[in-house]
Image: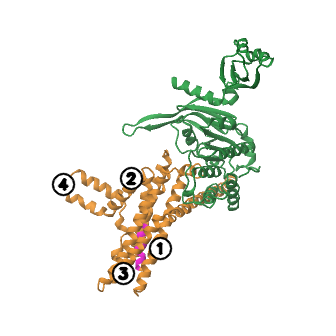
Chain colours: A orange, B green
Amino acid sequence: MNAVAESRPIATGSRVEVARALRKIGYVALNTYRETVRDKVLYNLVLFALLMIGSSYVLGAISVYQEIKVIKDLGLAAISAFGIVIAIFIGIGLVSKEMEKRTLYSVLPKPISRSQFLLGKYLGLCLTLLVNVAVMTVGLYALLFLMRHPFDPALLKAIFLIYLELALLVAVAILFSTFTSSILAALFAGFVYVTGYFSSDLKNLEGVVDSAFLPQLTRVLYYVLPNFKNFDVKAAVVAGDPVPLSQLSWATAYAAIYVALLLVASCWIFRQRNLK
Amino acid sequence: MLTFLPSEHKHNRPAASAVEANRNDVRAVETRGLAKDYLAGSFLQRKKRALDALDLEVDEGEIFGLIGPNGAGKTTTLKLLMGLVFPSGGEARILGRPLGDPEMKQQIGYLPEQPYFYEYLTGRELMNYFGQLFGLSREERDARSRELLEKVGMTEAADVPLRKYSKGMTQRLGIAQALVNRPRLVFLDEPMSGLDPLGRREISLLIRELRESGVTVFFCSHILSDVEQLCDRVAILNRGKLVQAGRLSEIIDVSLRAVEVVVEGLSPDLESRIAGSFRELRRQGPRSHLSFPDMPSFEKALPLLIGGGGARLVSVNPVKETLEDHFFREVKAGARE
C-alpha cells in the first residue's frame, strides 16, 4: 500500500525531471537554430544552391526533350551537396568552436548537463537543415512549376532520404567535434561521408587487391561506417522507378539507429572532456 | 550614469526550510586536496601540476578573494569548481553538494575570465537564453534582464549584437549574466578586467551590494587594491600551491612599519638633535621627509619638531603593510624556494 502511494510522487517527479530536461534541450536547440540562421555563410550557401537549381533551367533548355530530367537531377544534387556542406561546416562548429571560443564556459556551469547541451546542439542543426532543405525544395518545385511540369510527389521521397542522410552526417560531425579541433572534425566528417558513400565498393576491394592488411581494414570500415548510399534514390526517382515505402522505413530505422549510437558516443566523450 | 538602487535580492534557492536546516554546517565552498594536472608540451607530453592539494573553506555571506600571479592556478581552481575541467585528485563541494550537482548549479553564478558570448545574440537575448536554462518564467526573465542590464549600465546596448560590444561592455554583460538566477553564491574571475576606473568602482559597489543582500562572492583578481578593499578573507596561490589563507587582518602584518613625517624648515641644528630617532631623511625643496621606525621614536622627536625649533609639521603618516607588500613578499619567498 505504502509502496504504491510512494511510487506515485516519484513517478511524477521523474516525469517533471524529464520534461525539464527536454525543455532545456529545446532551448539549446532553438538557440543553435538562431545561431545558424544568423550566419551569413548559411545564406550564401542556400542562395548558391538556389542559383544552381535555377541554372539547371538553362542546362535543361539545351538538352532537347530532357529539360525536366536535367532540372530534377541537378536540383536534387544541389539539395544534397549543399546540405552536406552545411551539415559538415556548420555542424562541426557547433561544439568544437564553442570550445575554441570559450562560449561554453558560461553555459556549462548553468543547470544543464553536457549531454543535454550536445543533444540540443544536434537538434538545433537538424532544424536548420530542415528549413534549408525545405527552402531548396520549394525552389526546385517552383522551377518545375514554371516549366509547366505537374507536381511530382516522388521527388519528396528522394528529398526525405537526403534529409535523413544529412541528419546522420551531422551526428558524425558532432562526434568528431567533441574531441578534435574544428578543422580536423570537418576533415574527418568529410572522410566518413566519402568512405561511407563508397563503402560497398570498399567491400568489393577484398577480391581485387593482393594484400593481407588492406581487405581487413576495408572490411572494418565497411561494417563501422554508415552506408550513405542507402539514402541515395535520386537517380531512381528521376527515372520514374518506384521507391517502395519499405525502403523508406528501412532507411529511416537505419539512420535512427546510427544517429542514436553516434549521439550516445558523443555524449560519453563530451562528458569526460576537460575544456582547455 | 548608472545608479545602484537597493533592491531585494531573493535567492533562487530550494525550499527555504531545507536550506535553513543545513545552513550552519554547510560551507559555500570547501575543497580538500584539490589537484589538477595538465599535459604540457607539444610532442613529448609531460604532466604539469597546475593546482596542488588545495584546501579551501569559504563561508556563506563573505567576499572571498583568490589572488596570485599569472599561472598560479586561480582560473584552474574556478574551472574545477565550475565543472569545466575535472580534478586529478582531491574533492570539492559547493553549498554542501558535489561538483556538477544540478541543484547546486541552480544556485550559483559564474563570470569566466575574459568572457566570450554568442556574437549573434544581443545582450537581452543572451540574458533571456541563460534565464531559460535556469528555468525562469518569461516574466521573470524579462524583469531580471531589465534590472540587471540597468545595474551594469548596459540598458542602451541591450539590443545591440554582441559582436559589436567592446571588451568593457562584454565584461559588464558577463557580470549581469552571472546574476540572472539570483544566485546564492557567485564566482567572478577577474571581474574588473577590461573596465575603466568608473566601471571598476561600479562593480566594486555591486559586489558590496551583493554581500549586503547575503550573497557569497568568490573572486579571483590581479588587482590587489580591489581585493584589499572588498574581501573579508583572501587566499594567496603561487605556482599551484596555497601560500596563505585567512582574514586580511590575520595574514597582513597590521603592526606599524614606519611613521612617515613631513616637516618644513628643518634646520641642521634640529636635525642633529633628533638624529638618533629617525631612520631616513630626504630633502625636497623646503620640505624634509623623515621616516621613523616606530611610534616611540616619533614621540621622542615630536616635542622638538613642534616646540620652537623653527620647523613646521606638515603631515604625519603611519605606514602599515598593504596586501600588495605582503603579496610580493610571499611570492618572492616562493620563488626563492
**Is residue B215 visible from the viewing direction of this image?**
no
Residue A113 in the image, given as x and y percentages of width and height = 56, 51
User: How many marks can you see?
Assistant: 4
Which one is in front in this view, the residue at disc 2 or the one at disc 3?
A: 3
Residue at the (63%, 46%) spot, across then down? B196
Q: Secondary structure at mark 1?
A: helix
Disc 1 crowd, CA 10 A, few/some/many (<14, 14-19, 20+): some
| Location of mark 1 (residue) | A134
Specify the amino acid type for callout 4.
Asp
Is B115 above or below relative to A246?
Answer: above
Q: What is the distance, in whole Å, between disc 1 and disc 2 at their CAs?
A: 29 Å
| Location of mark 2 (residue) | A184
| Location of mark 3 (residue) | A57
Chain letter of mark 4 equals: A
Residue A68 in the image, given as x and y percentages of width and height = 35, 83
Which one is in front in this view, the residue at disc 3 or the one at disc 1?
A: 3
Q: Earlier in the sequence, mark 4 or mark 1?
A: 1
**Is residue A123 visible from the viewing direction of this image?**
yes
